[in-house]
Image: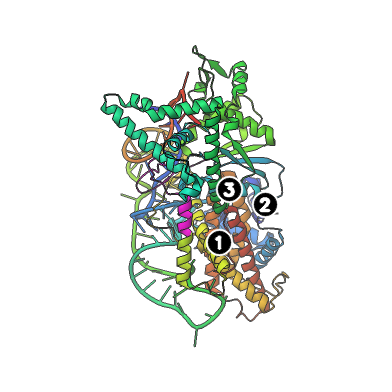
Amino acid sequence: MDIQESILKTIAAAFEQLFNHKVESEDLSLQPTRKEFEGSYTFVLFPYLKITKGSPEQSGEKIGNFLKENHPSVADFNVVKGFLNISLSSAFWIDLLTQLMAEKEPGYFPPRNQKVMVEYSSPNTNKPLHLGHLRNNFLGFSVSNILSAYGYEVIKTNLVNDRGIHICKSMVAYQKLGNNETPEMAGLKGDHLVGKYYVLFDQEYKKQIKELMAEGMTEELAKKEAPWMKEAQESLVKWELGDEETVNLWKKLNNWVYQGFNETYKKMRVSFDQYYYESDTYLLGKDIVTEGLEKKVFFKKENGSVWADLSNQGLDEKLVLRADGTSVYMTQDMGTADLKFKDHGIDKSVYVVGNEQDYHFEVLFKIMQLLERPYANNLYHLSYGMVDLPSGKMKSREGTVVDADDLIQEMVDTARNHTQELGKIEGFSPEEAENLYEMLGLGAIKYFLLKVDPKKRMLFNPQESIEFQGNTGPFIQYTHARIAAILRKADQIGLDYSSNNFEGLEALEAVEKQLVYMLSDYSKKIAMAAEELSPAVIAQYLFDLAKEYNRFYADLPIFSEAKNEVQAFRVSLSDQVAKTINAGMKLLGIDVPQKM
RNA sequence: GGUCCUGUAGCUCAACUGGAUAGAGCAACUGCCUUCUAAGCAGUAGGUUUCAGGUUCGAGUCCUGACAGGAUCACCA
């Protein structure tokens, strides 16, 4: 049984025996003791003063004494104001560490035989990935890892938005200005080449609008009448009709983009188990419209358009099918929701999509509920805030974006310079060194984007490059490397620390107890991160753990200790911290080095 | 304007879901490398938690109302 539960059971017994009052131990709760006080767990007395019919101090004394006498692991207690602080015996902590070491991996959860799909990335294929996509991809990948660690079977999905007016814009500009340029000729990655034409389209388009407005056209009309826009529209129609030339061009550009994306995904070290392409799925969902009409969830307006009336749900009316019978975003998403379920029999579905689509998903989930889909109550929108630049919002069309490839490269370069400055690559082969730079650069940027609560928008200042000190990925990686050095030394001198034999070990230091406590907390953090879909929980935890370990590292020597069992315990403790850091960082998608 | 999200140190973020004297990192200043890696550790300074009410033993956290920033309210995706 969990130590908290067992303490609470004893407290419940105390209430019964001391105050003749029955309470369920589930209704009681403990909290971690604040740093400045002695103890590990705190029981707050205020709510129970009516039962104990005494002052907080008296009540605390009574319960504390009862605990000390009746709970084998409670060594001591103190009462400050209305707070009963409980100290546990060293034997308890030693035993707890032994248990943690015996787990097959830190924070292990058994499989729960449920499938969850995590859809993330889902890029448009008309431009390269940028900083905002990095946040999306790292979040999606990390949440997938976290859910998987929590016992779910996870299917990582990328729904590629490969068709639509945006890609037609790149196509038109390429036809006009491209001269059959290829990525090789341009010396650009495929996605960057296509993105170049997307920007060129926008420049020319704006010029055309200006010209038309100069001729006296209103802005609204000019936007519609600009020749290139008309051509883009036409090319979309041709694409839908399957026009060979259009489709071939579309395929050519998209393939370039996919090659570029794959390279970037590889660099980001994210992956997918399932790809869906919107060109395959955009016609789905029309059957559901028919079904919805039959079930009277939808209604038809006079012009033939179909709507969902959610006004009694606190929402608006929402279009689900155009008057001309063509589908909209919502139609497709209803269709793909069913498709995902059909393909994989999923129990749960997570959409990693920016918060500008909050309303869309609220409506979608509501509709699926009204349509009585079995999975409808297990749909989650992991809504994350935009990444802003000091200059404001990023706009691909205007080229004011932080490019994903550039940023990653920049971080790796920074890591290289920084490491070389510190003179830390002695004994590294060139490959190992390069490996380390990537690990650190990528670790820095991933941690930077994941440590913040997903739903908050965040500011990224390219001028102040991402840090390597303090609350950063490299700080945690460094802590791991430090421990790795200790473990190497222990092996070297032949210290047996895996035997769990701490016989003779007496009092532990406060930092040691605190570390064991934090290690035992890891599984709760996984649970919390999984339930809240928030990698930030893990990131914050790892920082706190690393911080605490470094305190231990600075305060307590290991190999100069006279007693063998003290050495063994401290190395074991270090080992377990390293394993936990490694496991937690893996959840964030960050690798940790043995040396740095 | 309606709806939703956010507002905590100069800056970037925490605060275990209502508990103690609101904590970290960066930036500034001061110490600590002859002992397991100083990408570290210890310390100083920095706060009316946007504001005003309310709920209660107790509020950064809950409720109401302001204020500020953002998103969204398309037969776009």
The colour scheme used here is rainbow
Q: Amino acid at mark 2?
A: Lys
Q: Secondary structure at mark 1?
A: helix
Residue A9, disc: 2
Q: Name the N-terminal-most of marks 2 and 3.
A: 2
Q: Secondary structure at mark 3?
A: helix
In front of the other: A322 or A135: A322
Q: Quadrant of residue A292?
A: top right
Q: Is residue A571 visible?
A: yes
Q: Which-is-in-front pick, marks 2 and 1?
A: 1
Residue at coordinates 51% horizontally, 26% vertically from top-left? A238
Tell me the residue that label 1 is attached to.
A545
Q: Are marks 3 and 1 on the same chain?
A: yes
Left or right, A67 with reference to B6: right
The location of residue A310, given as percent across then percent down, is 52, 23
The part of the chain drawn in magenta is A383-411
User: For mark 1, does the 10 Å Cα neighbourhood hold few (<14), some (14 to 19), or many (20 or more) residues?
Assistant: many
The chain letter for the residue carrying disc 3 is A
Identify residue type, mark 1: Leu
Q: Residue furthest top?
A: A302
Quadrant showing the C terminus of chain A: bottom right
The answer to whether marks 2 and 1 sit on the same chain is: yes
What's the residue type where badge 3 is placed?
Phe
Percent coordinates x, y for residue A455 in the rendering: 48, 43
User: Which labelled disc corresponds to residue A141?
Assistant: 3
Give how far apart the Cα atoms at labels 2 and 3 are: 40 Å
- Residue B54, quarter of picture: top left
Chain letter for mark 1, please: A
* For residue A556, above or below residue A352: below
